[in-house]
Image (spheres, rainbow, N blue to C red):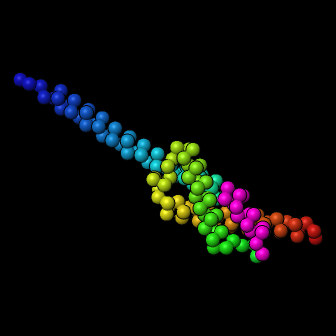
Amino acid sequence: MVNFFGLEQIALEIAATVAVSAWTVFKSKDFFKAKHMQTLLEGVEAGVNQSYLVFVAERKASSDDGKLTQAERVTARTKALNAAKIYCKLHGTDIISRFGEDFIVSKIEKQIRKSKRESYRKISYAEFFHHTSEK
């Protein structure tokens, strides 16, 4: 008589090994996707900061109303995008092929809004404490 129990046991062990391996690969993709997203967000923040320091602050200071023209805004966003690309490439992520330019530009615009809110808060707090200390 042939013992099929041993074969069934081996088949179950192989199936379990394949399932665990597949699950590990699936979860590792999530990890790398999150890692690339984190690199993108860091690159966008660095790009926006770099664009502000190199281009925006100078243009705002030299304008009559302290605002950028539409063309200057486009240039500032392009500079931020280029700086973000360089940052991410240095950190091992090709953000254009991974996320697409439209998605990255939307993240840049979101970071610009966030940076403006934070700078307004800093000014407001500084003005508040300056005025209250004079009384």
Assess whether residue 58 is covered by the magenta stretch: yes
Q: Picture coordinates of residue 122 (x, y %)?
A: 76, 64
Q: Is residue 13 above or below residue 67?
A: above
Residue occupying image coordinates x 63% and y 71%: 71
Looking at this view, name the residue that lies furthest to the bottom.
65
* Residue 57 in sight from this viewpoint: yes
Residue occupying image coordinates x 67% and y 73%: 69
Question: Which is more toward the observer, 62 or 5?
Answer: 62
Quick one: quadrant of the N terminus? top left
Magenta region: 50-64
Question: Which is more toward the observer, 81 or 28?
Answer: 81
Q: Is residue 129 above or below residue 46?
A: below
Looking at this view, name the residue that lies furthest to the left.
1
Residue occupying image coordinates x 70% and y 61%: 55
Q: Quadrant of residue 20?
A: top left
Would residue 67 appear left or right of 71 to someone viewing this image?
Answer: right
* Residue 44 in sight from this viewpoint: no
Residue occupying image coordinates x 56% and y 44%: 91
Number of numbered discs visible in the structure rendering: 0
Q: Picture coordinates of residue 44 (x, y %)?
A: 59, 56
Would residue 31 appear left or right of 117 to someone viewing this image?
Answer: left
Q: Quadrant of residue 108?
A: bottom right
Q: Is residue 36 above or below residue 79?
A: above
Assess whether residue 9 is covered by the magenta stretch: no
Looking at this view, name the residue that lies furthest to the top.
1
Q: Main secondary structure of the magenta part?
A: helix
Quick one: quadrant of the C terminus? bottom right
Question: Which is more toward the observer, 114 or 125?
Answer: 114
